[in-house]
Amino acid sequence: MRTADFDYLLPPDKVAQWARPRGTSRLLLLDRRGTGVRVARITELPSLLCPGDLLVLNEVRVIPARLVASRSGGGQAELLLVRPLDGAQWEALARPSRRLRPGEALRLKRGVAVPQERLGGGRWRVRFDPPLDGVQLEAVGEVPLPPYIERRGGPSESDRVRYQTVYARHGRAVAAPTAGLHFTSELLELCGARGIEACRLTLHVGPGTFKPVAVEDPRQHVLDSEDYEIPLAAATAINAALRAGRRLVCVGTTSCRAVEHAIAAGGGRVRAGLGRADVFIVPGYRFRATGALLTNFHLPRSTLLMLVAALAGREHVLEAYRVALANGFRFYSFGDAMLVL
């Protein structure tokens, strides 16, 4: 297996720069039983699933994790928050990392950020004054849109709303669980009316989701771990569904990674509580819980594309991508969706 095996040609105009209204996305149905692919709409999702299926939703909330600061000697620095440490300190990715110095005061829109210690890989331990509570973060941060979404004047207020699921509740994601962006409250209600249950967990999506695979053998790639929490109600629902032979439909690769890590850590049973998902899912992986997956279309050679290929088969997925391109589907975070059954 080579990283190049997961490459494909994507015309730049197929990268969605703006999100369609919720509930209007197109949907590509990929049946792993070999019946091919079918073009559908996201509004058909309830009829494509079965009564008794369990939707697993990641209800993490995206925070305004990108901070632009002014340097004392001129120029700018950019910080992308990764995770809180202690008190007023965060781990953050910095650009330009090599030029920063410990103790240098970076001026924010309000207050300062002071790099304290290099952590490697462009990451720093950074102290904020005042601390980044909810109010301060909203004042100084902006929506951390992916680098392939271009905004000359920075993210808009519309981006702040649209780059968030309707069921986002808490947490500190620096990237949206994008498969969930397609849902409206009404679509979730229609799923429930059909007898499709739903449970919610939280995986704090980190910047590692965009980390390119730079090695020839993807199995040598080091995937950043991500913290997650599975409430008791979700653990109970997942375990009950698996015991009864009902299908788990993971909404997004983040939900999938959390569930697969949790069931492995629990010895075949999901336990409520905290965890840190470090499982790297590539073809050859044996899924222990995921029965179906709703996902977006992912970057070439990415870990997310490899996860989808592990579930559906590399050739099936790449053929589905070719069909999607031929039919004008929109790709990446603000693009359309694919359902793997």
Image (cartoon, rainbow, N blue to C red):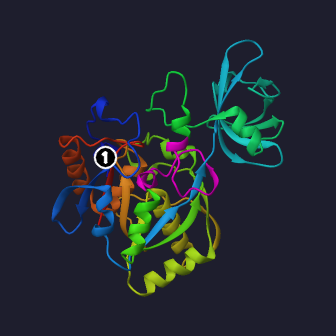
Q: Which residue is mark 1?
A: 6
Q: Is residue 324 above or below residue 76?
A: below
Q: Is 95 left, or right, of 328 in this rendering?
A: right
User: On the picture, is 242 further left or further right than 138?
Assistant: left
User: Which quadrant of the figure contains the C terminus?
Assistant: bottom left
Residue at the limit of the structure toward the front, as seen here: 186
Reply yes or no: does residue 153 show up in magenta.
Answer: no
Residue 197 image offset from top left, x and y in percent: 44, 75
Hey, which residue is sitting farthest bottom in the picture?
244
Q: Secondary structure at mark 1?
A: helix
Q: Residue at x 72, y 39 (%)?
A: 137
Q: Residue at x 43, y 32 (%)?
A: 148
Q: Is residue 167 above or below residue 341?
A: above
Q: Nearer the viewer, residue 165 or 32?
A: 165
Q: Is residue 268 visible?
A: no
Is residue 78 found left or right of 56 in the rendered image?
right
Number of marks: 1
Q: Amino acid at mark 1?
A: Phe
Location of residue 10 in the rendering, given as x and y in whole percent from the top left corner: 28, 35
Residue most toward the left?
A: 35
Q: Is residue 63 above or below residue 308?
A: above
Query: How dense is the environment of label 1, judged by Cα within 10 Å: few (below 14), some, or many (20 and up)?
Result: many
Extent of the magenta region = 161-183
Q: Quadrant of residue 18?
A: top left
Residue 8 vertical placement versus 155 (above, below): below
Kindly tell me whether residue 221 is visible in this rendering: yes
Residue at 22% from the left image edge and 54% from the top image edge: 315
Q: Position of residue 238 (x, y in %)?
A: 50, 77
